[in-house]
């Protein structure tokens, strides 16, 4: 029996694949490669010394998804596949709704057809919108400020309705805060196409000289330095949470949502200064106006995950910076390996 990883060539999915393989699981990986590269699949195999089936499949194509379950004895699914850029989701919302929601509906229908009803879903802290207080707990009201977040919230509601209709489903909804860092080997990490949507790849690209300066969106928030505060979590800690969630589903029925964060908030400039301290690289930055929908402060209360999953983040901000920098310096163009002249 194997674990199916959707979006397994992406940033978080690739790290989850390594974690599962290193813990003795068999995996099957699918990815559309629309925002990821095949090179990451090769490096998962390199890091673990293990082979596994990979299919270039888009979940919007239900026939292709169905074939995977015919070929392989799947026992559970980790669902990472989806478009994830907040700004882009405002520009092309229909693409986000079609890709993220239709893809998940197809996946769930195929899972039900093959009687595979254990699912770990990659959600997001964006479902909390602009919380009235911090730290954020899972019982807070859910609301969103952009189409990307709305797809995550809609999928959460779909999964709850699915369980109501059939109580044999076991579903863990994992609400990520801000994953950064990379595998300690420097062989897999975040490899964005074009301009990065996330803060850390932007910082590392400035540090290595690919960009002139960092844009800091807003310096007038009610924080100690005026910049937005977020909960940054090391991607390796994050995927260990997925393994704990998978094990939780083996013992427990129902649908449960869990925050995966450190419980600590750091500002944009805190992250910049920590990165500079670790790498001895100055990060020039330019303050620009706030982005529409951005919030001032958001960090997790991770106690539920600690109590029910037996999981907590272990790596600190400096380790996150060190591993991000090791990835960037080892792979200046990400997975896009330069062609020799």
Image: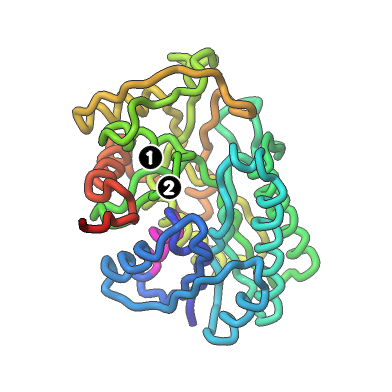
Q: Which residue is mark 1?
A: 201
Residue lying at 54% horizontally and 30% vertically, measured from the top left: 298
Magenta highlight on residue 13? yes
Q: Position of residue 249 (x, y in %)?
A: 56, 66
Q: Secondary structure at mark 2?
A: loop
Q: What crowding class fits label 1: few (fewer than 14 Cα within 10 Å), some (14-19), or many (20 or more)?
A: many
- Given residues 133 and 222, the one toward you in this image is 222
Which residue is pictured at 33% across the width and 27% down the height?
Answer: 212
The residue most toward the front is 341
Boundaries of the magenta span? 12-20
Marks 2 and 1: CB-CB under 8 Å? yes
Decide which of 93, 124 is in the foreground and name it. 93
Q: Quadrant of residue 340?
A: bottom left
The colour scheme used here is rainbow
Residue 46 seen in the current view: yes
Where in the figure is residue 31, as x and y percent of width and height?
50, 66
- Residue 320 in percent (x, y) is at 32, 40
Would you say residue 257 sits in the magenta stretch? no
Q: Residues within 10 Å of mark 2 (few under 14, many from 20)?
A: some
Residue at image location 39% in from the left, 49% down from the top = 190
Toward the bottom, the furthest residue is 71
């Amino acid at each position: 029996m194997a674990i199916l990883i959707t979006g397994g060539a992406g940033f978080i999915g690739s790290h989850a694949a390594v974690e599962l393989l290193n813990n003795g699981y068999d995996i099957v990986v699918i990815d559309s490669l629309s925002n990821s590269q095949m090179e990451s699949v090769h490096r998962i195999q390199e890091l673990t010394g293990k082979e596994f089936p990979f299919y270039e499949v888009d979940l919007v194509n239900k026939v292709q998804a169905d074939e995977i379950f015919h070929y392989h004895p799947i026992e559970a699914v980790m669902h990472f596949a989806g478009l994830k850029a907040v700004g882009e989701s405002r520009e092309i919302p229909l693409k986000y709704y079609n890709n993220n929601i239709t893809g998940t509906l197809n996946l769930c229908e195929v899972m039900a057809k093959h009687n595979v009803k254990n699912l770990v879903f990659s959600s997001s802290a964006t479902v909390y919108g602009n919380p009235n207080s911090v730290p954020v707990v899972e019982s807070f009201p859910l609301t969103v400020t952009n189409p990307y977040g709305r797809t995550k919230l809609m999928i959460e509601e779909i999964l709850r309705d699915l369980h109501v209709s059939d109580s044999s489903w076991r579903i863990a909804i994992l609400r990520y805060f801000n994953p950064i860092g990379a595998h300690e080997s420097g062989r897999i990490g975040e490899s964005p196409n074009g301009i990065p949507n996330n803060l850390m790849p932007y910082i590392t690209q400035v540090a290595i000289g690919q960009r002139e300066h960092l844009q800091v969106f807003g310096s007038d928030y009610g924080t100690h330095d005026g910049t937005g505060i977020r909960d940054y979590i090391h991607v390796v800690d994050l995927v260990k949470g997925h393994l704990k969630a998978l094990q939780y589903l083996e013992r427990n029925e129902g649908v449960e949502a869990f925050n995966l964060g450190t419980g600590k908030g750091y500002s944009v400039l805190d992250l910049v200064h920590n990165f500079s301290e670790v790498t001895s690289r100055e990060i020039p930055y330019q303050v620009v106006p706030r982005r529409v929908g951005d919030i001032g402060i958001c960090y997790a209360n991770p106690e539920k995950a600690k109590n029910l999953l037996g999981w907590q983040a272990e790596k600190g901000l400096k380790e996150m910076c060190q591993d991000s920098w090791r990835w960037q310096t080892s792979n200046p163009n990400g997975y896009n390996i330069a062609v020799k002249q």
